[in-house]
Amino acid sequence: MVVAATLVTVTTLLLSVFGAINLLLWSKHEYARLYRVLGAQSSELAVALAAPVWNFDHPQIDKILDSQERVSPIEAVVVIGAGRTHARVRDERRRLVPSNRPIVTNGLLMEERPITFGDERIGTVRLYMTPRIIEAELRMQIAGTVGAIVAVDLLLIVFVYLVLWRYVLKPIVAIEKYAGTISEDGTIHAPALQPAPTAELESLRVSIETMVRLLDRRYAELQESMARRLESEERFRTIFESVNDAIFIHERNTGAILDVNPRMSEMFGFTREEARQLELSTLSSGEPPFTLEGAIERVRSARSDDRLLFEWHTRHKEGHLFWVEVSVRSAVIDGVERVVAVVRDITQRKEMEEALRRSQTMSAMGALVAGVAHEVRNPLFGMSALLDAYADEMTTPDLVELLAGLRQQITRLTHLMRELLELGRPVVITLEPGSLHELLDEVIQARARTATQANVTLQSTIDASLSAVSMDRARLSQVFENVIDNALQHAPAVRNITVGATLLNHSDRPWIEVRVEDDGSGFQPNDLGRVFEPFFTRRERGIGLGMSIVQRIVEEHGGRVTAGNRAEGGAVITVRLPAV
C-alpha cells in the first residue's frame, strides 16, 4: 500500500503538471487562432459589403449577412450603413436570424471594421464570435487528461501489487501461515517452508526454521518440567484452599496482595476480590509496635529462607479487633518468589490467657481486700453504735453538725466495705434464658429519676425482637446499673445517654451487643487500658470498683466488655453477650 500510494501520488502530480501546461498552451493557441479568424472574417465582410452599402442594395446586404451562418463561431453580425442597421443573431437552433433587440455581448469576442468605398467611409460592420467551442473542447481535453491519469494510476497499482505479491507478500504470507500452524495446533511440527525469492526473506525463513528446530529439541523437556510443576502447584493449591489458617500471598517487590484463600474471607470478612484491593494498614489496629507491613518488609529484604513469627492485633471488616498469630516467609510460587503470610486466629487463646491473668490477680486481690474489709467492718459497727449512744446528748448546733458529718463518713466507709467484700467474694451465678430487652427497659426505668435530677436525657434504641440470652437476672442488672451510673456521675458534662442493642455474628456464632453511649468528654486515651482495673477512677470521691465488678460479671456470663470513645465525641461501653 505504501509503495503503490507513493507511485500513484508522484505519477498523478507529474501528469497533472504536464497536463495543465499542455492545456494552457492549447487554450492560448486556440484563442489566438479565434482572434485571427475574427479579424480576417470582419475584414472580408467590410470589403464584401462596400458595394451593396454604397448602392443601398439592402437585399444584397442581407444575403451577405445570411451567408455568415456557415461560420460556427460567429454569434452575431451588425452592419450600420445605407441608411439603416442590419443585424443577425443566433437563435436557439443556432441559425442567424434578423433581430431588432440589443445584442447581449457577455462572454463574446467583438471586432469592428469600417466599410469604405473610394476612400470614403460609408458604414460600419461589427462581428461577434463566441469562445464556447474552445471551452467545450477544453473540457473534453481536461476529461481526457484526467482519464489518462486514472488509467495510468490503475495500471501502476496492478503492476505494483503483482510484483510485490510474487516477491514479498506471498513469501511473508507463507511464513505467517507457518507460524500460525505452530501456534494453533500447539505443536512445532509443521511442513517446511519453500525457498524465498529474495535474499532478505530467505534469511528470515532460515532463521525461523532454525529456531523451530531448537524449540523441537526443548519441547519434550519443557513438557516434562511443566508436568512436574503442575503436580507441585496442584498440591500447593489443594493445601491453599483447604487449610484452616488464613493465607495471604504477596508480591515480593511491592508487598501487594496477590491472592488469599477461602479461610481468609471467613476470618476477616472480605471477599477475595475485596482482599486483593486491600491496603495492609486497613487490617492493622495500630496498637502493637510490630505490624504485618513491617514483617513483609523485613522478609522482602532478608534471605529467602528467613521466617518471622509474631502475634498481631488485627481488624475485622465489621470493625471489631481480634488476635492472630502470623508466620511470614518467602516461597517460590509459579516459578516466582513470593511472600506468604499464614494467619491463625488466637483470639480465644488470648482471651483465656487474659481471663486467667485477671482471675489470678482478682483472686489474690480479693483475698486481701476481703480480709481487710472484715477487719475494718467490726470497728465501723462499734463507731456507729457509739454515735447512736451519744446522739441524745449531742444537741447543740455544732455537735449536731459534727454528728451528721461523722455518720456520713461512716456510711461511706460502710459502702466501701460492701464493695470490697463483693469484689473478694466468689461470683456465684445461675444462668437462665431471658429477654435482654425487658431487663434493659427495667434498668432504664429504674435510673430515669436519677437522670432527670441530673438533667440528663436517658433513651433506648433497643430492638424488641432480639434473641434471648442466658443470664443471671440480678447480676446482669447490676452490670447495666453500674455502667449507666458511671455515665450519670459525669454530669453536667454528659447531657444524653443512649442504650442500644443489636444482633451480630462473630466467630461463627450469634452475639447480642449492647452499647451505652454518652455525649460527654469521653475517656482520656491513656486511661482506656485501665478502665476495668480495681480502684482506678478519675472522680474525686470515687472508689473505682464498679467497672471491675462489671467486667467480672460479664465474663462469668461468657461475654466481653470493652471501653472506647465515639468518633463524634463521648464515651461508649460495649457489652457483648452470647445469644441463645
Image (cartoon, rainbow, N blue to C red):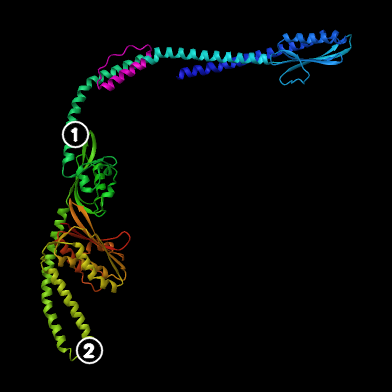
Badge 1: residue crowd in 10 Å (few <14, some 14–19, many ≥20): some
Magenta stretch, residue numbers? 171-199
Any magenta on residue 189?
yes
Spatial separation of the CA atoms under disc 1 and disc 2? 91 Å
Any magenta on residue 129?
no
Residue at 25%, 55% (x, y): give it. 287
| Amino acid, disc 1 | Glu
Q: Residue 1's image quarter?
A: top left
Q: Position of residue 508 (x, y in %)?
A: 17, 50
Where disc 1 sits, the SS reads: helix
Mark drawn on residue 399: 2
| Amino acid, disc 2 | Leu
Residue 454 versus residue 272 in the image, above or below: below
Residue at 16%, 55% (x, y): give it. 350
Q: Residue 243's image quarter?
A: top left
Q: Residue 233's image quarter?
A: top left
Where disc 2 sits, the SS reads: helix
The residue carrying mark 1 is 233
Say left or right for 426 vs 146: left
